[in-house]
Amino acid sequence: MAERINSSKRQSTFRRLPEFVLSSAAIVGLVLLVAGLFWSRVVPSQALWSQEQAQEYETAAVKLHEQSHSQAENGDEKQQLIISARQRFEEARQDLESARHARDYGGRYLSLFGSLLLGSSALGLYFRRQYAA
């Protein structure tokens, strides 16, 4: 008799666990959805693109411009300097593009993931309660 009671307690615990997990996932999904909607207002641009990075980008652009218009005696030396300046500028530009992408699409990705998590959790809870007889 005692074994039967313990067994039924275990079954009810296991039955509640998925509902707790689904409810928690729905709450997390709602938080992610709201965070995604307010992403551009909450996350400062300095978190994605620092003053040092902006200074590096500007310095690289100026160096590339200077090297492309300089009059070096040796043509190979000039080409090496231009290639070096172009690589530095491209690295800084890629960092800028990454920061822009994170700023523009970070909130969308959070909202999308939050919506999917919230919707799938809500469906899971609905079907669990419908067919948990």
Image (cartoon, rainbow, N blue to C red):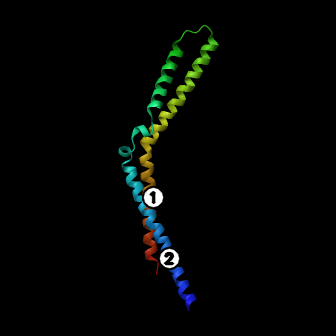
Does 40 appear above or below 31? above
Instruction: Estimate the spatial distance between the alpha carbons at disc 1 and disc 2, rounded to whole Å.
Output: 24 Å
**Helix or strand or loop: what does disc 1 sit on?**
helix
Residue type marked 2: Arg
Residue 96 at x, y = what percent? 47, 33
Task: Give the residue number, with chain letter if any, for mark 1.
Answer: 116
Q: Residue at x 55, y 89 (%)?
A: 2
Q: Residue furthest right?
A: 76
Placement of 58 over or under 31, stated as above or below = above
Count every numbered label the image shows and give the total.
Answer: 2
SS under mark 2? helix
Q: Disc number at residue 36?
A: none
Q: Nearer the viewer, mark 1 or mark 2?
A: 2
Q: Residue 81: image x %, image y %?
A: 59, 18
Residue 18, above or below 90: below
- Considering only order in the chain, which callout, 2 or 1, is on the residue closer to the N terminus? 2
- The residue at 40%/55% (across/down) is 33
Question: Around disc 2, counting alpha carbons within 10 Å, would you say few (fewer than 14), some (14 to 19), or many (20 or more)?
Answer: few
Q: Which residue is mark 2?
A: 15
Q: Nearer the viewer, residue 133 or 21?
A: 21
| Above or below for 94 versus 38 | above
Q: Quadrant of the N terminus?
A: bottom right
Q: Residue at x 51, y 13 (%)?
A: 69
Residue 80: give x, y in percent of width and height.
62, 18
Residue 18 in the image, given as x and y percentages of width and height:
49, 71
Q: What's under tag 1, amino acid-wise?
A: Leu
Residue most extreme to the top? 73
The residue located at (42%, 48%) in the rendering is 108
